[in-house]
């Protein structure tokens, strides 16, 4: 009998595969339901991050894991603050004059993916604190100083990029269209 690669996996799905599929669908369902609840998601993340920080402080170790986590957070933050289309590569796409067409700021890394990636990173880092393999002895003040220098230089470059191409990645202070406002005559008539 000639066995080919197409025959592999054509049998009934195993119990593990069915269970894995069910868990995956259920997890995705809860993720989808959490999407509009950004305050709750971020509060949950703050609790998770606090537990991680307390654990690292209590254990007085795992500084390499925390440093790697910090570098990853910095990388995610850059993606969160950057536009999807880089104006340095493709030219300015945001309006520079009052007569230009308005194009909304679209992030390279959307808020939900930013939150989800941060949460996964903290869960993985927290799990790593249960294995002594990752507790490499280092002089943590040097790592902290190096991370702060990296953060300051990276954020300086990002802020200069924002100023040069005139974009603000946050909606705080931006004008919003709220429809036509009633004129003074209509407002006085509606009160009567």
Image (tube, rainbow, N blue to C red):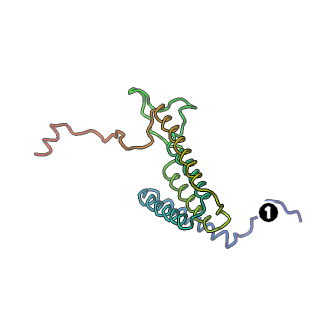
Residue lying furthest right in this view?
1
Circle 1 — which element? helix
Task: Please tell me which residue lies in front, 141 or 190.
Answer: 141
Q: In the rendered image of this protein, does residue 19 appear above or below residue 125?
A: below
Where does the image place residue 53, in percent across and percent down from the top left? 51, 62
Q: Is residue 72 left or right of residue 164?
A: right
Q: Residue at x 63, y 71 (%)?
A: 19
Q: Position of residue 51 (x, y in %)?
A: 50, 65
Asked where in the image residue 65 lies, by quadrant, the reply is: bottom right
Residue lying farthest bottom?
15
The number of callouts visible is: 1
Task: Indicate the quadrant where residue 28 lies.
Answer: bottom right
Compared across the picture, whether 172 is left or right of 150 comes to left
**Looking at this view, is 82 or 51 the one in front?**
51
- Which quadrant of the rendered structure holds the C terminus? top left
Looking at the image, the residue that sits furthest to the left is: 192
Residue at image coords 56%, 31%: 90
- Estimate the x, y position of residue 88 in percent, counting from the top left: 55, 31
Identify the residue under disc 1.
7
Answer few, some or many: residues within 10 Å of disc 1's Cα (few below 14, many 20 plus, some between 14 and 19): few
Q: Please name the residue shown 52% across and 37% down the image.
A: 157
Q: Position of residue 22 (x, y in %)?
A: 59, 68
| Quadrant for the N terminus in the image | bottom right
């Amino acid at each position: 009998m000639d066995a080919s690669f197409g025959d592999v996996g054509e049998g009934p799905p195993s119990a593990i595969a069915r269970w894995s599929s069910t868990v995956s669908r259920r997890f995705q369902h809860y993720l989808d339901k959490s999407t509009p609840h950004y305050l709750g998601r971020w509060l949950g993340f703050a609790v998770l991050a606090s537990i991680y920080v307390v654990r690292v402080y209590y254990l007085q170790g795992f500084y390499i894991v925390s440093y790697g986590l910090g570098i990853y957070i910095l990388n995610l933050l850059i993606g969160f603050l950057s536009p999807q289309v880089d104006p340095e590569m493709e030219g300015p796409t945001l309006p520079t004059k009052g007569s230009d067409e308005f194009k909304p700021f679209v992030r390279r890394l959307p808020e939900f993916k930013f939150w989800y990636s941060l949460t996964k990173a903290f869960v993985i880092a927290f799990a790593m604190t249960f294995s002594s393999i990752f507790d490499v002895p280092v002089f943590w003040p040097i790592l902290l100083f190096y991370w702060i220098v990296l953060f300051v230089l990276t954020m300086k470059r990002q802020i200069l990029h924002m100023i040069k191409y005139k974009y603000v990645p946050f909606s705080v202070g931006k004008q919003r269209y709220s429809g036509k406002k009633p004129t003074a005559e209509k407002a006085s008539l509606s009160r009567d």
